[in-house]
Image (cartoon, helix red, strand yellow):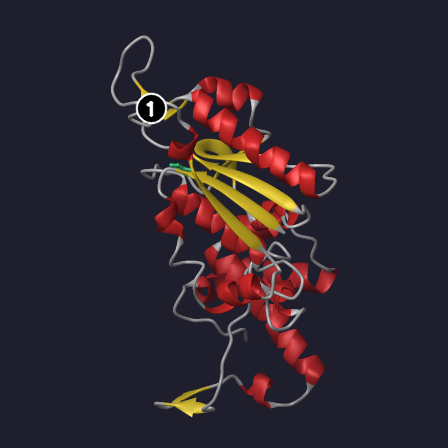
């Protein structure tokens, strides 16, 4: 996958992509990340990227011309090298659709992405209307710019690309992949400061382990994000488990400090 990022602060992206899984993915050419400084696409001697809003008001607005020219230049570079059928051009903005694991999976299917990091009071509306194909928000809060959101999106997408994580199967167990939260994980020692690893995990019995994990997934989701369960297909036995746990005598089990199923 090739990801092109338009930003006023390309240096912000250096650290997150220089370590661990990301560095390996880049070195193994599973992904390439090209950073473009929007300022490089200006033509005046002050390299002006923003201007006052028409109609007045606080803050500055990013001008359309450098953004259009940057995207057009990236597009022609991509198209000169290969045939592309779909090329999402994504603006990071608190007004966008709310980012989720599902959207990460959707984006991971493309061979190219262009991300535009907004700044200041916003971006000239013509960029939204006539250039971008998608707008993404990483949450209902306002950050100083689209750089951190772009990093979040890139991270969530890149780890889904084939070969990026050590084991091909590991993203499948992630929280949110099946619409629920992941079960608790333990490693050695079996007893630490008197706290034992749940017996089911030590049993070596795969069916028992799978059952315990599924129950824990449901219990944890019920405790922390009950609304997720409404959107998930559970089998009859699992539905009964939810009903049992939410029935009045068992409700105390749903406090966050107790995670056992009786
Ligand atoms: N830019 C500023 N805040 C943002 C957010 N929450 N999501 C995406 N882009 C943003």
Looking at the image, the residue that sits furthest to the left is: 58
Residue plotted at (59% across, 84% down): 200
Q: Is residue 111 above or below residue 191?
A: above
Q: Is residue 118 visible?
A: no
Q: Is residue 116 above or below residue 213?
A: above
Residue 197 image point, x, y percent:
48, 85
Foreground residue among 230 and 2: 2
Residue 236 falls left or right of residue 225: right
- Would you name the residue on which mark 1 appears? 50
Image position, residue 185 (x, y; %): 51, 76
Give the vertical position of 37 relative to 178 (above or below): above
Viewer-proximal residue among 82 and 108: 82
Quadrant of residue 26 within the rendered picture:
bottom right
Dividing the picture into quadrants, the one containing residue 39 is: top left
Q: Could you tell me which secondary element the residue under label 1 belongs to?
A: strand
Q: Nearer the viewer, residue 27 or 99?
A: 27
């Amino acid at each position: 996958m090739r990801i092109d990022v338009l930003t006023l602060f390309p240096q912000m992206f250096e650290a997150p992509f220089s370590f661990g899984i990301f560095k390996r993915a880049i070195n193994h050419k599973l992904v390439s990340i090209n950073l473009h400084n929007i300022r490089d696409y200006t033509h005046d001697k002050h390299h002006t990227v923003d201007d006052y809003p028409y109609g007045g008001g606080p803050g500055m607005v990013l001008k359309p011309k450098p953004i259009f020219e940057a995207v057009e230049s990236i597009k022609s570079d991509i198209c000169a090298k290969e045939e592309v059928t779909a090329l999402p051009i994504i603006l990071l903005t608190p007004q966008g659709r709310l980012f989720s694991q599902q959207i990460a999976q959707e984006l991971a299917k493309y061979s190219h992405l262009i991300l535009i990091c907004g700044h200041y009071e916003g971006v000239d509306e013509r960029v939204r209307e006539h250039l971008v194909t998608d707008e993404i928000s990483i949450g209902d809060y306002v950050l100083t710019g689209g750089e951190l959101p772009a990093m979040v999106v890139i991270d969530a997408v890149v780890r889904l690309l084939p070969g990026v994580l050590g084991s091909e199967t590991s993203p499948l167990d992630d929280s949110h992949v099946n619409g629920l939260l992941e079960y608790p994980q333990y490693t050695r020692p079996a007893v630490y400061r008197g706290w034992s690893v749940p017996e089911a995990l030590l049993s070596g019995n795969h069916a028992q382990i799978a059952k315990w994990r599924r129950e824990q997934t449901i219990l944890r989701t019920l405790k922390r994000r009950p609304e997720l369960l409404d959107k998930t297909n559970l089998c009859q036995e699992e539905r009964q488990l939810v009903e049992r746990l939410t029935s009045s005598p068992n409700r105390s089990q749903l406090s966050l400090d107790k995670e056992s199923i009786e």
